[in-house]
Image (cartoon, helix red, strand yellow):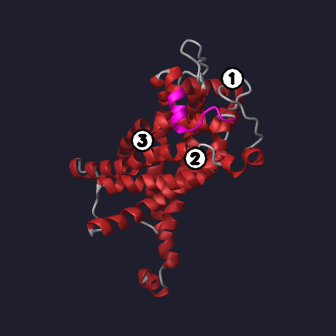
Amino acid sequence: MSTTAGAFIAGGIAACGAVTATHPFETVKIRMQLQGELQTKGHQPHHYRGPLHGVSVIVRNEGLRGIYRGIGCAYIYQVLLNGCRLGFYEPMRAGLATLILNDAAKQNLGINMFCGAASGIMGAAAGSPFFLVKTRLQSFSPFLPVGTQHRYRNAWDGLSQIFRAEGVRGLYRGVGAAMIRTGFGSSVQLPTYFFAKRRLQKHLGMEEGAPLHLASSTASGFVVCVVMHPPDTIMSRLYNQNGNLYKGVFDCLAKTIKTEGFFAIYKGVFPHLARILPHTILTLSLAEQTNKLMKKLEDRILSPPETQSMKTA
């Protein structure tokens, strides 16, 4: 592993590469989560019926610009979220393993899940204002609107309007749901990835490389989607609300289930899966490579001159 700063940068770069490919499915997922909001069954619109149908509808009516609404905010959020998640996870895990198990290299599921959740929560809190604006930009449609519509010219205009109207508190609207959602996902993402990686190496004899990274991150992506989607739906609705439609996480959960049924919290799960699988695969696979590059760069920059001369000799 590179240093914490190096891992932070590597994780952010990897996540930006991943989000470029998966952002359209994120847009569809958010719109599906918001369509039919607090409307009883039989009275809900179905503008977006699935990942591919949703992408085709948006591109046909709004062009590529519509499907990539909020991409700038997504980049900033991913740098902060995955920088924290991939940068702080290993130092925290090694520190707790040393403190509790007296061995930094020893793996423990409880410690791994705690560190995954804690690093994810830190990233979610840091990036929450950008995810807020991203959600509102992605939900806006001049052709097939769903949920509350917010007219922002761009990310900066969105941040400015929210700050002027509601202050700092408005920028952090829904941060509790974001922390729960990311804590859930992060508690299983990296532990599942490393667990799958170790098992594939041990039982199938797979060696370090792209196939191992692909298989491990695929297993991780499935688990993350199942665990994270319900709080993700709640977070999308809290972020997109206008005024105080919901008092908080549990009020939103209760109103959603009461009005729309239990499975409403899994609205948009297929576009979420279509997004999270390639996103997890690309993020974790790219992180392995970017982390190696950062380590080489750090070795060149941080190594004493005599050490570098010995390496080149």
User: Between 133 and 280, which is closer to the camera in this rendering?
Assistant: 133
To which residue does mark 1 refer?
144
Q: Nearer the viewer, residue 11 or 92?
A: 92
Q: Within the image, what quadrant is residue 137 found in?
A: top right
Task: Give the numbered dot on residue 100.
Answer: none
Looking at the rendered structure, the kind of residue marked 1 is Leu
Quarter of the image with the C terminus is bottom left
Q: Vertically, is 208 above or below 69?
A: below
Q: Badge 2 is on which residue?
A: 175
Q: Earlier in the sequence, mark 1 or mark 3?
A: 1
Callout 3, which amino acid?
Answer: Val
Q: Give the spatial CA distance, label 2 vs label 1.
A: 27 Å
Q: Nearer the viewer, residue 210 or 286?
A: 286
Residue 90, placed above or below residue 51? below
Rounded to the nearest angstrom, the CA distance separating label 1 from label 3 is 30 Å
Determine crowd level at label 3: few under 14, some 14-19, many 20+ residues with C-alpha closer than 10 A: many
Left or right of residue 220: residue 79: right
- Residue that label 3 marks: 224
Q: Is residue 285 magenta?
A: no
Q: Nearer the viewer, mark 3 or mark 2?
A: 2
Res. 233 in view: no
Q: Earlier in the sequence, mark 2 or mark 1?
A: 1
The magenta segment is: 243-255
Query: What is the three-letter code of the residue carrying label 2?
Result: Val
